[in-house]
Amino acid sequence: MSAPATEPPKTESGRFKAGLEDVVAGTSSICLVDGIEGKLLYRGYDIVDLAENSTFAEVAYLLWYGRLPSKSEFEVFQKEFRGSIELPEQTSMILRLFPRAATPMEVLRTAISSLGHYDPDSGNTSQEACLRKANRLTARIGSIISAHERLRQGLEPIQPIAGQSIAFNFLYTLTGNKPQAILEKIFDICLILHADHELNASTFAARVTAATMSDMYSSVTSAVGALKGPLHGGANEQVMKMLLEIGDVSKAEAWVINALKNKVKIPGFGHRVYKTEDPRATVLRKYAEQLGKHVGNTKWYDISRIVEKTMFDYNEREAKKIYPNVDFYSASVYHCMGIPTVLFTLIFAMSRITGWTAHILEQWANNRLIRPRAEYTGPLGLRYASIETR
Ligand SMILES: CC(C)(COP(=O)(O)OP(=O)(O)OC[C@H]1O[C@@H](n2cnc3c(N)ncnc32)[C@H](O)[C@@H]1OP(=O)(O)O)[C@@H](O)C(=O)NCCC(=O)NCCS
């Protein structure tokens, strides 16, 4: 007996775009990415201006509250922000239980999820409680990263110093040395630059989870899972691996030409949205040079410059538009600060958590379940046959 002919479901055929490229999936007043002009604004402020003049804590306030704080508002906010940095004892204990083979990003995912169990506001869905949760999550993520890294190295975690910035305490609890002011400042700028980037994959994942009216910890855990993938958060680590493999300024040009000949993509270049230089790369180039000079090792910056020049010449020859992105110069900056390469993606999470939580709050302010359609391409009208007759 032939299967009955069934009409395929009426999907909007022809309107599907792989990877949702250029699809506008919602409105947002948090972040503007102008890929043509090479501009990035948070709540209307140019990131170049914020990087020069603001701090990560103030940018977190800006993203969550939609405006810059007054002096008194910021004092209250900063006290709470800096005061939330210590991990619940149970989360500190969990960090000791992971298998040695667990990658830091996998550990971060599980540890973030665990924080939800010990948050006194866990079941409170009011706007005020959600802001407190965003605050605690942002303050604690660096503590998770540094504590686990020390355990991985066979060292005991270090307690953060009360009243210090997130940047200071991250570098301090990671290395055991109080960072020089210039290192704290440049790391803080890196956190500002990575804080938000519209509907990137991890932020979209966070909003999809939030839109089901799940909780903030589940939404951020979804985002960490999405960021972990090498097509999203992993590029800065790949840049450092490339710089280490090149190893010397004299080898940089030939290395890049050879890679391009073999159709290998150069990590830290290209972007889905920017058709010109990523403005974050422009800021980071300056600090990569400054930091290299400060620590007396400009080798990684110098190699980066040759890689960039070789890509520039290639673009001219091939009429292509492949510019450095945020990951390119952040690699040598983190390396010069003594941060292990395996942590680079986690630093991205440490900053982007402000954007994730701002988007979750924005989603809840005007929520509608995110539930797109798929264009069905499978078979139709099949009839079930018992297992004996198949
Ligand atoms: C970011 C990225 C995924 C964007 O991808 P995309 O928008 O899908 O663009 P495509 O991969 O289709 O690239 C378009 C063209 O530029 C080339 N190109 C893009 N990025 C390149 C790179 N980093 N090195 C060399 N060539 C590159 C592609 O080979 C392609 O050339 P073709 O048209 O001759 O085939 C891509 O540029 C990339 O893989 N970059 C390296 C990884 C990275 O730095 N990621 C972090 C992004 S913030």
Image (cartoon, rainbow, N blue to C red):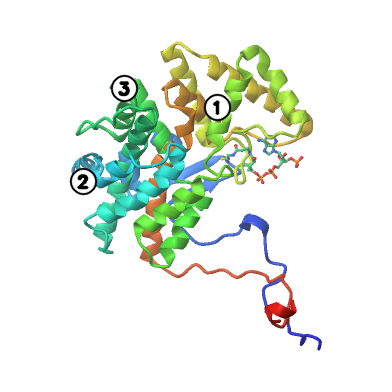
Give the mark nearest the N terminus, 1 or 3: 3
The residue carrying mark 2 is 73
Residue 304 in view (yes/no): no
Dot 3 corresponds to which residue?
Answer: 179
Residue 369 versus residue 223 in the image, above or below: below
Can residue 374 be seen here? The reply is yes
When asked about the image quadrant of residue 178, the answer is top left
Q: Which is more foreground, mark 1 or mark 3?
A: 1
Q: Amino acid at mark 3?
A: Pro
Q: Secondary structure at mark 3?
A: loop
How many residues crowd around disc 3 within 10 Å: few (fewer than 14), some, or many (20 or more)?
some
Marks 2, 3: nearer the viewer: 3
Provide residue 17's location: percent of width, then percent of height: 67, 60
Q: Secondary structure at mark 2?
A: helix
Residue 99 screen position, x and y as percent: 42, 40
Residue sitting at the far right: 2
- Amino acid tagged 2: Glu
Residue at 52% from the left image edge and 30% from the top image edge: 282
Which of 49 and 65 lies nearest the eye of the viewer? Answer: 65
Q: Nearer the viewer, residue 213 or 45?
A: 213
Residue 124, given in percent of the width and then of the height, sits at 25, 63
Crowdedness of circle 1 by 10 Å Cα count: few (<14), some, many (20+)?
A: many
Which label number is shown at residue 39? none
Helix, strand or loop under label 1: helix
Name the residue located 32 percent from the left edge and 27 percent from the top edge: 155
Amino acid carrying mark 1 in the image: Met
Q: Position of residue 28 (x, y in %)?
A: 45, 57
Q: Nearer the viewer, residue 331 or 79?
A: 331
Of pointers 2 and 1, the one earlier in the residue sequence:
2
Q: Report which residue position mark 1 lands on.
A: 240
Viewport quadrant of the C terminus: bottom right
Q: State whether residue 171 is above or below residue 271.
A: above
